[in-house]
Image (tube, coloured by chain):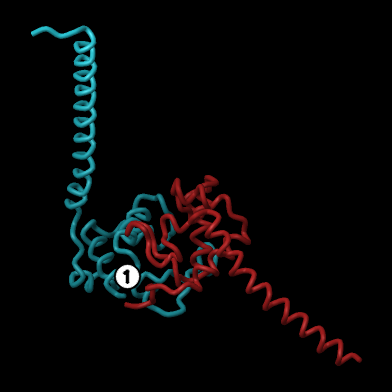
Chain colours: A red, B cyan
């Protein structure tokens, strides 16, 4: 009995993890589309419309999270010591995002194929 | 020559239109000149030299050249992949750290130590690493 519930519990847990990850990427893509990020960064972030905008596809998700939070801090008027980015365009977009939106869109971008690499 | 009143006013109207059109063309021409003047001033910026950058990357590779390297301010996160990144964007980012538009203790200090030529060279180098 105990074993059965344990087994059942694991199945439920695994199921939940799998769904939440799949939902994260889908939700991330929805954020990308809602804010029309493609209008500057290209359809999947792999080829920007202008070379002065960054390629985002395949970038580390945790770095993208950090960059978006920096824009949020910059837009909120945080002091320079707080690791900020001050940019009128990106600040305006970033401040519309919840913490979950930031995590989701970053995860989705990191999963897109692109030319970025760690090389020296 | 004798014109009817109707013909005269028609001619007046036409000449007025011609003046307006000429003004519009002149305005457009001035605007076009300004537009073309922009790339010209951009051409004054130093041109990146991939070879020259190879003696300048020592401060970059200690973080950006190591797989799995993480920064620890203000949280722990992976340093960005910059190989293959857009040349112009890399320049924008470095200048933003130098100007204070972006802040990060390590990158601020490094960006401030770079000349315009260094920035152009490093951006060209990392863009070339596709």
**Residue holding disc 1:** B59
From the viewer's perspective, is B10 left or right of A38?
A: left
Q: Residue at x 44, y 69 (%)?
A: A57
Q: Residue at x 26, y 70 (%)?
A: B125
Dot 1, how many residues are within 10 Å of its Cα: few (below 14), some (14-19), or many (20+)? Answer: few
User: Which of the pair B3/B55 is nearer the observer?
Assistant: B3
Q: Secondary structure at mark 1?
A: helix
Chain at numbered mark 1: B
Residue A58 position in % (x across, y down): 45, 72
Residue B29 position in % (x across, y down): 19, 35
From the viewer's perspective, is A3 left or right of B85?
A: right
Quick check: B8 above or below A43?
above
User: Which of the pair B14/A100 is nearer the observer?
Assistant: B14
Number of disc labels = 1
Residue B120's image quarter?
A: bottom left
In which quadrant will I find the N terminus of chain B? top left
From the viewer's perspective, is A55 left or right of B40?
A: right
In which quadrant will I find the C terminus of chain B? bottom left
Residue A2 position in % (x across, y down): 89, 90
From the viewer's perspective, is A58 left or right of B4?
A: right
Residue A119 position in % (x across, y down): 34, 78
User: Which of the pair B49/A3 is nearer the observer?
Assistant: A3
């Amino acid at each position: 009995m105990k074993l059965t519930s344990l087994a059942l519990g694991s199945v439920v847990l695994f199921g939940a993890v799998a769904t939440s990850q799949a939902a994260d990427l889908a939700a991330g893509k929805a954020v990308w589309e809602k804010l029309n990020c493609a209008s500057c960064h290209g359809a999947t972030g792999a080829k920007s419309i202008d070379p002065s905008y960054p390629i985002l596809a395949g970038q580390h998700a945790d770095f993208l999270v950090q960059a978006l939070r920096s824009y949020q801090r910059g837009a909120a008027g945080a002091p320079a010591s707080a690791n900020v980015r001050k940019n009128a365009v990106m600040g305006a977009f970033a401040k519309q995002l919840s913490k979950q939106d930031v995590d989701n869109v970053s995860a989705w971008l990191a999963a897109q194929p692109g030319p970025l690499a760690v090389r020296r | 020559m004798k014109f009817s009143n109707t013909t005269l006013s028609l001619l007046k109207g036409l000449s007025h239109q011609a003046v307006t059109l000429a003004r519009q063309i002149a305005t457009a021409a001035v605007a076009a000149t300004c537009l073309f003047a922009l790339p010209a001033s951009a051409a004054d910026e130093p041109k990146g030299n991939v070879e020259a950058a190879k003696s300048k990357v020592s401060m970059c590779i200690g973080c950006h050249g190591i797989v799995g390297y993480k920064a620890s301010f203000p949280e722990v996160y992976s340093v960005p992949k910059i190989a293959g990144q857009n040349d112009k964007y890399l320049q924008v980012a470095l200048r933003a750290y130098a100007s204070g538009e972006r802040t990060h203790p390590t990158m601020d200090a490094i960006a401030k130590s770079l000349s315009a030529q260094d920035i152009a060279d490093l951006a060209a180098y990392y863009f070339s690493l596709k």
